Amino acid sequence: MSEKILVIGESRDGVLRNVTFEAIAAAKKINADAEVVGVICGSENLNDLAQEMIYYGADRIVTVKNEKLTSYTSEGYGQAVLAVIEDENPYGIIMGHTAVGKDLTPKIASKLEVGLISDAVDIHVDGGQTVFTRPIYSGKAFEKKVITDGLLFATIRPNNIPALDRDESRSGNVEEKSVEISDLRTVIKAVLRKASEGVDLSEAKVVVAGGRGVKSADGFKPLYELAEVLGGAVGASRGACDADYCDYSLQIGQTGKVVTPDLYIAVGISGAIQHLAGMSNSKVIVAINKDPEANIFNVADYGIVGDLFEVVPMLTEEIKKL
Ligand code: FAD
């Protein structure tokens, strides 16, 4: 059996996503002695990204540089990563459970005719077997899964497996692999992004989320102020999105983003089951709601019963004093 675990790196706007570093830590949890080989695809700046992966614990990096890999497509990245897998013959592959990870890994698994464990929140070795823990039933329960035969292939949920400390004294080889990418059936002409500022919601350590109780787009302003003093991001319930108080890109829940920050502050959110599906695994949950019977208090570690328009500015002012 090869002693290599591949970590598929993911970058956005020329910067590696944090979950890439968490995937390196996950690979080390599977086998601290395995060689962790990072894979980075793209068309520029690959050596800088490679170096960063090495600082976070990767032993060696393979880059695949090609103009056709400038933007992510499952077809282009699939060909590139499969070529690296064929060369390296790893016994494990880990990637972040992001939009890209969710798209790319099933394609690779089906090409390789192997299984895939998606959305793991923990990995540990028990009696020589690697056990992956993943949420089921919208986060209401967890299952433990093992792969009894073949490649250990998994995606990991961001913010659950802590990355190793960045260590600039680490070094490792960076090898460029040339891969012939066939003409792509999908070509990305331009990426138009909605203007968004600040911390990425999926990877934020602190999330301040507003619901229908916030009552208007203006009502979100105090939430942005609180998020800013905490260095966090703003999210929302579908109730708030449906009411047009904020953009759907902020929606958290079963049909929105799944977040697991260190601190989740739910403001004017009732705690519908579909909302809990996206945030109930947060490490500490604080709920602010004027209704003491609101379901959100059932999952909250700390609850504040009160009017959010009084409580949120007070909290912001107090935190500013710290
Ligand atoms: P409400 O339920 O209206 O709650 C508002 C809360 O604000 C109340 O608890 C109220 O007491 C409180 N409040 C009001 N004024 C104040 C004040 N001044 N101070 C303090 N508190 C105040 N929902 C999601 O969030 N995410 C999803 O991904 C999602 N997916 C869904 C998928 C399906 C198939 C379906 C059917 C529904 C889905 N929903 C989802 C919708 C979900 O069922 C709820 O309708 C929604 O979460 C309610 O949003 P809310 O808590 O903001 O609003």
Image (cartoon, helix red, strand yellow):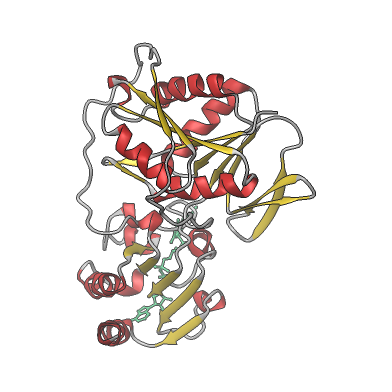
Relative image position of residue 284 (x, y in whole percent): 49, 73
- Residue at image coords 42%, 58%: 252
User: Which quadrant: the C terminus?
Assistant: bottom left
Camera-nearest residue between 150 and 260? 150
Q: Which quadrant does ligand 1 occupy?
A: bottom left
Specify whether residue 82 is in view.
yes
Relative image position of residue 117 (x, y in whole percent): 62, 40
- Residue at image coords 31%, 73%: 230
Quarter of image, res 197: bottom left
Relative image position of residue 321 (x, y in whole percent): 26, 87
Residue 123 in the image: above or below residue 182: below
Specify whether residue 119 is in view.
no
Residue 322 in the image: above or below residue 141: below
| Left or right of 138 on screen, residue 195 | left
User: Which quadrant: the N terminus?
Assistant: top right
- Residue at image coords 31%, 84%: 315
- Residue at image coords 58%, 47%: 28
Residue 307 in the image: above or below residue 241: below
Residue found at the very far right of the displayed protein: 127
| Left or right of 71 on screen, residue 81 | right
Camera-nearest residue between 87 and 188? 87
